[in-house]
Image (tube, helix red, strand yellow):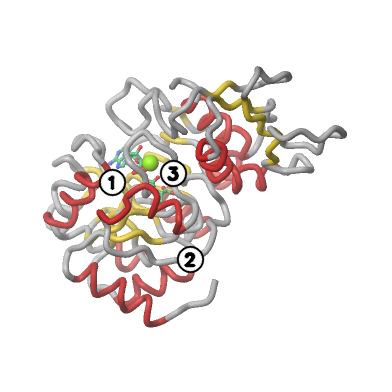
């Protein structure tokens, strides 16, 4: 998708007025607002119907911009050099004099930060005097948005503008790593954790416990298409849509392909839009073929597991 400076200017104008808008990232679309503004941040929570104790990710252009607000450490530098900009979010300690709105972090002293790779987002950040708080652009517990039309479907006229950046290339949210103490993974996502292990040269803990306070967004019910979803399925029930990852010999009206050649990156990219599509077609339930639990397949299975708790 080409950069359109007049759209970026329009986005900046809304953000400067503390309005929230939809913006594209390489992972999923975000519902963005000025992270230094209490008004903008409170608006994000209200629009998403998000519990105020579930903190937001703040998006920066680069490390220079970040240093105003956060303390950085060696693990962060190593990972930043290798993976940012990209689909990884770091939890860092906030500086005492940081300008981040207290509503972003629910008054705690750690901040989730990410450096998006999407060219349109980067171009926008270059023009702003503040970083952008942006959770995924969906109503709380619902499916994330991976194209501009999804964001409009979620929020309708409640938001004034969606910056169109085409379809997200990754399609799953970022991987989250807590670096405020011994590194631990809080959410599986677009960056394969085996790559993180190679860079840190040590074992990393997992803290993906839905009952723990540290990452409240990891609640059990999440990423829900709003209809029942079954996973690891070989045979569908009557009236069920069937999401597949390998080409079948026999065609059927209820078959929907996440990939035709078992390509897990493609599955990730198509997952949310395919779930949204079959839901909108009026299916009463969704069955998904078994997805190999390796690489990004682990993050895909994490999302499907949660979506199946409906
Ligand atoms: O790819 C992504 O990360 C997308 C795009 C828009 O950047 N954003 C996203 O945001 O997925 P959201 O709000 O849907 O998920 C953020 C997660 C939540 O589970 C939240 O609980 C966790 O990050 N989180 C935020 N701040 C935290 C903190 N200080 N400590 C622990 N977890 C935190
Ligand atoms: Mg989300």
User: Which is more toward the observer, 52 or 130?
Assistant: 52
Query: Is disc 3 placed on a helix, strand or loop?
Result: loop
Evaluate if marks 3 and 2 touch, with contact meaning CB atoms under 8 Å apart: no
Question: Is residue 153 in view?
Answer: yes
Asked if disc 1 is less than 8 Å from ligand 1, the answer is: yes
- 1 or 3: mark nearer the eye: 3
Q: Residues within 10 Å of mark 3 (few under 14, many from 20)?
A: many
Asked if disc 3 is less than 8 Å from ligand 2, the answer is: yes
Asked if disc 2 is less than 8 Å from ligand 1, the answer is: no
Q: CA distance from mark 1 to mark 2?
A: 22 Å
Q: Residues within 10 Å of mark 1 (few under 14, many from 20)?
A: many
Task: Name the disc covering residue 144, or none.
Answer: 3
Residue 13 placement: quadrant: bottom left
User: Which is more toward the observer, 35 or 109?
Assistant: 35
> Which of disc 3 and disc 1 is earlier in sequence?
1
Write down the residue under mark 2.
165
Residue 81 located left or right of residue 261: left
Query: Is disc 2 placed on a helix, strand or loop?
Result: loop
Give how far across and how far down residue 301 sits, in percent: 57, 30
Write down the residue under mark 1.
56
> Which of disc 2 and disc 1 is earlier in sequence?
1
Query: Is disc 1 placed on a helix, strand or loop?
Result: loop
Q: Residue at x 45, y 49 (%)?
A: 145
Give how far across and how far down residue 32 sits, in percent: 30, 58
Quadrant position of the N terminus in the picture:
bottom right
């Amino acid at each position: 998708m080409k950069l359109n400076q007049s759209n970026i200017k329009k986005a900046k104008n809304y953000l400067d007025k503390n309005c929230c808008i939809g913006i594209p990232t390489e992972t999923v679309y975000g519902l963005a607002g000025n992270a230094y503004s209490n008004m903008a941040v409170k608006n994000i929570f209200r629009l998403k119907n998000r519990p105020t104790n579930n903190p937001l990710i703040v998006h920066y252009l680069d490390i220079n911009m970040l240093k105003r607000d956060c303390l950085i450490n060696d693990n962060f530098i190593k990972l930043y050099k290798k993976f940012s900009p990209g689909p990884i979010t770091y939890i860092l300690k906030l500086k005492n004099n940081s300008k981040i709105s207290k509503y972003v972090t629910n008054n705690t002293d750690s901040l989730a930060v990410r450096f998006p790779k999407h060219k349109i987002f980067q171009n926008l950040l270059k023009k702003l005097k503040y970083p952008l708080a942006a959770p995924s652009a969906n109503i709380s517990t619902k499916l994330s948005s991976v194209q501009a039309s999804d964001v409009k479907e979620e929020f309708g006229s409640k938001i004034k503008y969606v910056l169109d950046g085409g379809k997200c290339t990754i399609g799953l949210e970022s991987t989250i790593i807590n670096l405020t103490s011994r590194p631990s993974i809080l959410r599986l996502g677009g960056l394969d954790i085996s790559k993180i292990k190679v860079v840190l040269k040590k074992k990393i803990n997992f803290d993906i416990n839905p009952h723990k306070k540290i990452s409240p967004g990891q609640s059990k019910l999440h990423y829900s298409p709003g209809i029942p979803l079954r996973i690891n399925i070989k045979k569908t029930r009557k009236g069920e849509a069937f999401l597949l990852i390998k080409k079948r010999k026999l065609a059927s009206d209820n078959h929907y392909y996440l990939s035709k050649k078992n390509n897990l990156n493609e599955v990730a990219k198509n997952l949310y839009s395919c779930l949204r599509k079959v839901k909108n077609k009026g299916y009463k339930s969704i069955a998904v073929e078994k997805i190999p639990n390796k690489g990004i397949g682990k993050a895909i299975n994490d999302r499907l597991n949660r979506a199946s708790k409906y």
